[in-house]
Amino acid sequence: YTRLIDLSIGGLWAADGIEIFQYEVLWKKAEQKPDLLFYLLSTYPDEKVYSFWYFYFNSLLPSKEGIPVCFTALKGKYPKIYQILEKAFKDSDGQATLPYG
């Protein structure tokens, strides 16, 4: 999980296959063990946590589902991580642009 976090920090959505990592690996793993993810993120500086969540939610189209329920369930246990998650979600959801357009 630490490698997934480290790979995601500083990441941006692009059409050249990064969405496969984002959708097929990152999202699935994060939602399998959200408590572990939040715990590990709590050991990182805020700006890296924000960068992780920014990449996590960055997409061309706004999310229809919003923030996953498995993350909202951890709002009370990890309030700082969740606050950063909410800001990154608002800032990045549907904000990605195609690299060639």
Image (tube, rainbow, N blue to C red):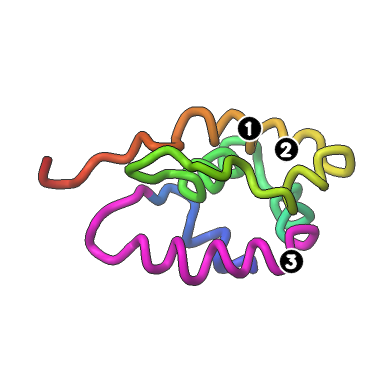
Question: Which disc, if any, is residue 33?
Answer: 3
The reply to whether the C-beta atoms of the residues labelled 1 and 3 are less than 8 Å apart is no
Q: Residue furthest front?
A: 64
The quarter holding residue 93 reads top left
Give the alpha-carbon distance from disc 2 to disc 1, as whole Å. 6 Å
Give the alpha-carbon distance from disc 2 to disc 3, as whole Å. 15 Å
Q: Position of residue 67 (x, y in %)?
A: 63, 42
The reply to whether the C-beta atoms of the residues labelled 2 and 1 are less than 8 Å apart is yes
Q: Nearer the viewer, residue 65 or 8?
A: 65
Magenta span contains residue 26: yes
The residue that appears at 58% across and 40% down in the rendered structure is: 66
Q: Secondary structure at mark 2?
A: helix
Span colored in magenta: 12-36
Left or right: residue 56 versus residue 101 is: right
Vertical side of 20 occupied by 63: above or below = above
Instruction: Point out the image quarter for the C terminus.
Output: top left
Classified by dominant secondary structure, the portion drawn in magenta counts as: helix
The residue that appears at 52% across and 29% down in the rendered structure is: 90
Give the alpha-carbon distance from disc 1 to disc 3, as whole Å. 19 Å
Question: Which disc, if any, is residue 86?
Answer: 1
Q: Position of residue 62 (x, y in %)?
A: 42, 38
Q: Position of residue 4 (x, y in %)?
A: 55, 65
Q: Which residue is mark 2?
A: 82
Left or right: residue 16 versus residue 7 is: left
Amino acid type, callout 2: Tyr
The quarter holding residue 59 reads top left
